[in-house]
Image: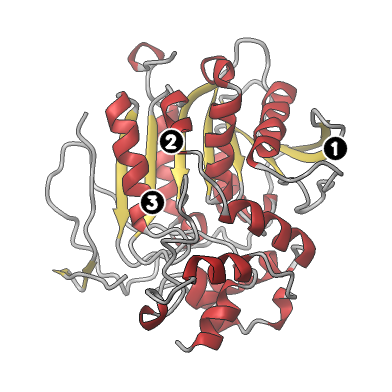
Amino acid sequence: MRFPVIGPVVGAVPVTLPFASIGLARQALLGTVPASARKLLAPGDTGSVQLPASAPLPNPTLFSEITAPVADQTIVSKDGTRLHVRVFGRPGAQPLVLSHGWTCSTEFWRPQINALADEFRVITYDQRGHGRSELGRARLSPELLADDFSSVLSGTLAPGERAVLVGHSMGGMTIMSWADKHRAEVARYASSALLLSTASDRLTAEELVIPPMLRNVPGRPVLVHALISAPVPTGLLPSEILRYATMGTASTPEQREFCRTIVNACPRRVRGMWGTVLGRLDIANALDNLVVPTSVLVGSADRLTPPVHSYRIKDRLEMSGNLESFSEIAGIGHMSPVEAPEMVVSEIRRLAGIPASHRRVG
């Protein structure tokens, strides 16, 4: 299958974007979330779209109040932990299930909810320990993410109903972990999937937050792991450090403040505990079980889960015949659903429109 690959461009001139002191890098890693994306080629195109990387995307729905009907519910996961779930839109509409990233919450999906809830049933939930979901007593692990996701799917989808699954950063890791542990559920619950700014392994070995001059020092992966698992209050971090670690240079003040507010709401203990889990993640084999059309999207300026991760995911999905599309978007950082909401919404709509007869499932 053909798929779009978008090289970075600045001012319509193709360039190669290189992928701040020790203190800056250390602070940037101490408790932030990811996301990124910025530009899409139509299926079948072979050249790059000439989009100035400095042009901010219009974003009128970022802080807008959500007006779609919403139903709040509590779903109990397999270990008894209570998860907070929000379902937007009208009952019976085509379902979308959105899984947010590290240190975020259901609020992170506000641009997508505002854009899609009039047409779809948008199902969101707070990851364990985030937002209004309990942390529980079980040892945190990718398997626990998988069980939580399984509980959300079984608790919100009607018999025979299948959804477009969307995961950003840790949310993408959640979908992969679920496919690994609950392989039989993929054909039962998923029609397609979208993996945004995420990784399947080698997270601490290949981040780009640490300055270039320190990337080859002995013990660097150990240092990075210690930083992302440290329970330091995010409120101590200046907004510019959060921007450096998680967003592209073209991000707007509104986008940065939106992300800062959400990240600051995550308890530091939760951030540190999940950081420990993600730093040791190794679920690449799970991609072989994601047997539905799957798109991958990443920003060229993503420092937390750099494009190298998405390229490996793309290659694995392509080998199994399940890659639907791949897009690297110039100038966007780790917060793709916020930095490039139109691109994310467009791909979700496209995946939702794939006829059932064209899907390879199982």
Does any portion of residue 32 appear in the rendered image?
A: no
Query: Who's the residue at 44% across and 74% down the image?
Result: 218
Give me the disc on residue 349. 2
Q: CA distance from mark 3 to mark 2?
A: 24 Å
- Mark 3 packing: few (<14 Cα in 10 Å), some, or many (20+)? some
- Comes first in the chain, label 2 or label 1: 1
Residue 179: image location, x then y, percent: 54, 27
For label 1, the SS is: loop
Q: Is residue 210 visible?
A: yes
Indicate the secondary structure of the residue bearing disc 2: helix
Instruction: Name the secondary structure under disc 3.
Output: helix
In the displayed orientation, state which residue is furthest to the front.
Answer: 218
Which residue has dot 1 on it? 81
Does 37 sit above or below residue 55? above
Say few, some or many: other residues with alpha carbon within 10 Å of mark 2 (under 14 / 14 to 19 / 20 or more): some
Q: Which residue has dot 3 on it? A: 309
**Residue kind at label 3, given as amino acid type:** His
For the residues bearing labels 3 and 2, Cβ distance under 8 angstroms:
no
Q: Is residue 252 left or right of residue 315?
A: right
* Distance from Cα at disc 2 to Cα at disc 1: 32 Å
Q: Nearer the viewer, residue 85 or 119?
A: 85
Which of the 4 quarters of the picture holds residue 321? top left
The answer to whether residue 151 is above or below residue 329 is above
Residue 196 x, y percent position in the rendering: 46, 48
What crowding class fits label 1: few (fewer than 14 Cα within 10 Å), some (14-19), or many (20 or more)? some
* Lateral position of residue 9 relative to residue 324, left or right: left
The CA span between labels 3 and 1 is 31 Å
Q: Are marks 3 and 1 in contact (CB under 8 Å)?
A: no
Label located before the other in sequence (3 or 2):
3
Sequence-first disc among 3 and 1:
1
Q: Amino acid at mark 1?
A: Thr
